Amino acid sequence: MGDWNLVEDKIDRSPQHDDDPGVTSEMARLKASLDLVDGWRLSNPEARSFSWEGTTGNERRKIFSRIDRIYTTRKTWVITNEYNIINCDFSDHDGVSVRVRDASAIKTGKGEMKLNLNILKHPIFEKELERLLYKLEKQLDKYRKQVKGKLKPGKEQSLHNLRTRYNPQKLWCNYKTGILEASAQATQARRTEIMKAHRRAEREIKKAKRNLARCEPADEETCRKALSKCKKTLSNYNKEARNNRTHITEAKWYKDGERMTKRWFGLNKTRKEGTGIKSLLKGTAGGETSNPAEMLEIARDYHSKLQSEPAMDGSRELAIESILSNVERKLNEKESKDMEKQVSYMEIYGAMKKAPCGKAPGPDRILNELWKSELKRRQKEEGHERPCIAVLMTKVLQDIKAYGPIDTRFSEARMGLLYKKKDKRDIQNYRPITLLNTDYKLYTKVISNHLREVTPSLIHKDQAGFMPKRSIYDQMKIVELMIRWCENSENNGMILCLDQEKAYDRIDLRYLWRTLEAFGFPKLFIERVRNMYKAASTAIRINRFVSELFNIRRGVQQGDPMSCLLYNLVIEPLIESVRKSLLKGFKVNEELRRVLVKVYADDTTIFLGNEDKPEELQACLDQFCKVSTARFNSLKMEIIPVGTKTFRSELIMSRKFNGWEIQEEIHIAQDGEAV
């Protein structure tokens, strides 16, 4: 395909004339040898249309030709259709296109509509958004006034009846539904405006092309000028949108330049062949399926079982008490009171302003850009008492904190699956990412900020994951330095890199609540977090198809701002039990504390000296797995031998360390091998 600079028949030129016979005969020979056909001409045997416009002679007469063509083999032509010549407003050549049917292509669904950011300043949307804001403010004020007299003892039934009519959470969800409806209405209006203008211009172009095809030779010059004018009109419609995109790109370039931002990585990363899931194994039933409904059922069944509540027995209760007895650091009285404080307007306002843009939306399909634009819109309208979205959201979130999520739509989620490695057909080889509603994430971001204030005093410095003023680079540097130190000082041992299977998803929530109690978190705070998980439900999204909802009764959700710190608290008793075990690790000198364990979220690195018994470590891991229902994946476990070259070679050859026979599936790194 491309610009061939010749035509095979004079019908493809205006004014009509034959091309050089020598050139056309060579073209015919090439086509015959490769069994090629001109797809557009085969689909339109008698039609006249042109892809290039130019001028000739001193009189600057307009000339047209169809020199841009797509050729295909006769065998391939049967699976192609929709050969088109597309108007291009930034070149003297028009584009040529074809649709190719792929029998092996992944079947995709319609997906879920998300808020259209292009209509945030559309008059229809702005007017409806303002009306919805005033309506919500009026309803919340009415609720606040009526609830004052029903908070006294004996008025519980009256309060219940009032909350049934004016529940702030349901009013908020109805407000968000109204936003989507207004977005759809404004999008349709904007699309209609653009389409009308384009269709009018395209009709004029088709009319001019018909006139050119049917006109007498004497009138061709006039018809060609008319066609050129019509194409220029359509070009002007497209130019504005293209210029807007150009200005946005230039602004981003001036702002970010060559810094390694999200945009930079997006431009420079390797493009993958596709992110869809072609098929999944049926498990015990055998075989595989590419049917969307069956794939959704396989994924839903796997994750609903994975995140169902595990059984609790007496031995687990004793194990939980035993491992939590290692917790020594607790919240003081002031910190405990701070964790009970109510959500404030300034916290919501700050979280809203700092919320990242360009993130995938949750089930409500509303993006952070809407909340941020609403804040800016209110700041510009000085002297106009427009309701503040941060104030209204604060009132709703305070209600959620007091009563828990009543409307389940608030804590509903979508689960996306990202392929990791190994067999693409195995559902276990996909990492689940939870897409949550933006207002839910703003609320849990505030909770996360409260946790960030107290967790540094609760979690040992060995844990660097998502902790203020701690970095993964510190952990990596320690590993690198210990490898060198062990070799120079001839201290033999190993560095054991552990990996958990579905770490966030497997944590038993009952163990999480007990852990929070052990760290001294007040019951009111624990109950608030527990309420968020009681109402949690999710649906799996595969190839734009969405499964039925299922409840989350196990694990913390990846994508939730508070999940990372909650998980750090969950794994801290394990790290503490390793530190209190008989394991010694490496002691560099008397001034520095021993190097035994380093953690980044769930990625755990253990340093075992020549006298350490792996059975001690295994006992700690088994106890943690029992209480939390976590599982360590031996297939992803890696060992780095450290010390003298002789010791490292012997360990690799014998696969033995202090009586421990290393399983075959555990990888032992060779010298110089990256892990």
Image: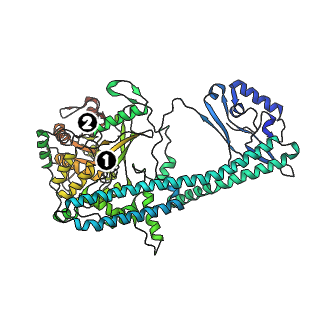
**The disc label shown at residue 453, or none:** none
133 up-or-down from 107: above or below: below
User: Toward the viewer: 432 or 185?
Assistant: 185
Cα separation between marks 1 and 2:
43 Å
Q: Who is closer to the viewer here, 345 or 599?
A: 345
Q: Can residue 462 be seen in this view?
A: no
Dot 1 or dot 2: first in sequence order is 1
What residue is at 49 percent from the left and 39 percent from the top?
A: 272
The front one of 443 and 318 is 443
Q: From the viewer's perspective, tell me whether residue 354 is left or right of residue 253.
A: left
Which image quarter: residue 623?
Answer: top left
Tag 2 residue = 647
* 376 horizontally vs 337: left or right: right
Q: Mark 1 points at which residue?
A: 557
Q: In this view, does 448 lie to the left or right of 279?
A: left
Residue 439 horizontal/vertical position (percent): 36, 56
The residue type indicated by label 2 comes to Phe
Q: Which amino acid does label 1 sit on?
A: Gln
At a point 34% along the width and 48% down the height, the residue shown is 412
Query: Looking at the image, which residue is at 80% across and 48% down?
Result: 224
